[in-house]
Image (spheres, grey):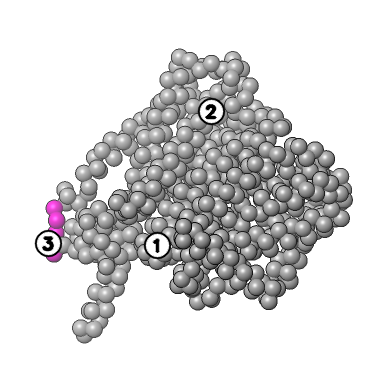
Amino acid sequence: MPGVASMWRDALLVMAKDLRVELRSRVAINQVVPFALAVLVLFGLALGPNLHLLASETAGLVWMAVLFSCVLGVQRSYAIESTDSAKDGLRLSGLDPAGVFLGKAGALAIQLFALEVVLALVASILYGAPLTNALVLVVTCIVATLGLAAVGTFYGALALGARVRETLLPLLFFPVVAPVLMGAMKAWQAGLAGTPGKADGWLELLFVFALAYGAIGTVAFGPLLEDG
Amino acid sequence: MITTELPDRPTPTETKRPLGERALRVVGVLAVVGVVATVWLGLWITPEDQFMGNLVRLLYIHPPMAWVAFLAYGLSFLSSLAYLWPRTRSAIWDRLAGASAEVGVVFTGLTLVTGSIWGRPTWGTWWTWDPLLTTTALLFVLYLGYLAIRHVPGTDEVRGKRNAIAALVAFVDVPVVYFSVYLWQSLHQTPSILNIETRKTTVHGSMAWTLLLGFCSFTLAFIWLVAQRYRLAGLEAREESFGLEIALAERRLEGGR
Amino acid sequence: MNGYVIGGYLVVLLSLGTYALFLVGRLRASRRRLSATFPGLDERGPEETGSST
């Protein structure tokens, strides 16, 4: 089916473009990563020097930091479109809107994944939690991140044109990704605690979530960008 | 195109209000009567429960709040579907979805408050992370976000489509959230309104009737509130489009001098 | 009688009552504004009367 093939082709185009912009501007590396690290440190401060508590709650803290960073990532993802009207720029580019969605979500997911690797390493040091069962941790990151990127990219488009986008987006994003937070946190806890088997159900939940919101975003992106 | 509903001749006052006005008034009166009756029955006539004591009286209002919230979001969902369906697309559905969601947010807030009030004397805390209450809390924020989206500027068509999609996605998220929270806390048994005490209680006799009355009265109240909110939305839309007419008329007058 | 129960009932009644009054108030104000400008106007929304925006 020519439609599907061109959708994936456009997706790769957009993903490559977004990643290239990031490599050149390094905003994620220079700003989002330090922000996430600061969040990890501040969590440590918020929970007092209670090392036992920090070690046992590492999973939840890391994933909250990821959620905060994802919001920033989405804002950035839309900020790099033409500054006058991102909506028009995306629509007039002639690319399949579903492909644009997949591309932008994909680029965001890749950047988030890289961030998670960094956060995992830093958190294991800050909170004194060894990264046991790394495979479970990695798989969780992949599945959870796809879901986060899909939801974020979708709501980023929904909030386009709103002057209050900066405050609206987190409000829209957080309640919807609560299941991802729960799933990723529980799966990581299972891995870190040495009982990787317990993560299975949560990984399934995360997978279904990613599929569902990936599909929703792919289908709804076009209508959202339309002018009438 | 701006609506031009300016009659040159004044229309008779009886046709000023739509025909539904009388029906709405009846609904409103019934709602008030029903709610008052529920309160009277709930607080005085019905007996204490042998396990929960007087706390059972909250059972006549907390579940109705939750039921109406659910009803409200369901109506928003269906209206949004009706809007997106090309053959039935109309601003009516968009306005109805918005009105229903706003009323829904009010009842969701009340669900949380009454649930919390139940929890305090029962388990000593103002909040238990049980799946129903936690999902309701997330639902509250989810729909506040939806109401915020409705304020984002754009043409009527753009906003209508955007609102409808947002409502659909929010509604779809509800079972996902509930399922996740249920899994998340099931490992630690948290106290829940659905647990021990309510199972021991058999609701019968005057209690059952009061509960039913509660559901019906608050549903009527919901209908009345949504209808009023819907009309308000219609009037405000009119004011908006007439605002331009009024301004243009004023410009013309100025130009004429 | 349990204070919590009374509190619960009060919160519900007062909130809904306030919201209802709020809606009615805004409706009256809006009708007043519209009929002051266009006397005898019927109050159905634009779409319900078949005209388009």
- For the residue carrying disc 2, how many other residues have a C-alpha within 10 Å: few (<14), some (14-19), or many (20+)? many
Residue A34: image quadrant is bottom right
Query: Identity of the amino acid at label 2?
Result: Leu
Q: Residue at x 41, y 34 (%)?
A: B218
Q: Which residues are magenta?
A: B8-12
Q: Is residue A115 above or below residue B40?
A: below
Q: Residue at x 62, y 69 (%)?
A: A16
Q: How many angstroms separate mark 1 from mark 3 (CA)? A: 35 Å
Q: Position of residue B206 (x, y in %)?
A: 45, 17
Q: Is residue B107 left or right of residue B184?
A: left
Query: Identity of the amino acid at label 1?
Result: Val
In the structure shown, which secondary structural element does the residue marked by tag 2 occupy? helix
Residue C2, magenta (yes or no): no
The residue lying furthest to the left in this view is B9
Q: How many angstroms separate mark 2 from mark 1 (CA)? A: 43 Å
Chain name for mark 2? B
Chain name for mark 3? B
Query: Identity of the amino acid at label 3?
Result: Arg
Residue with the mark numbered 2: B58
Q: Nearer the viewer, residue A126 or B3?
A: A126
Q: Are marks 1 and 3 in contact (CB under 8 Å)?
A: no
Residue B158's tag is 1
Q: Position of residue B243 (x, y in %)?
A: 31, 67
Residue with the mark numbered 3: B9
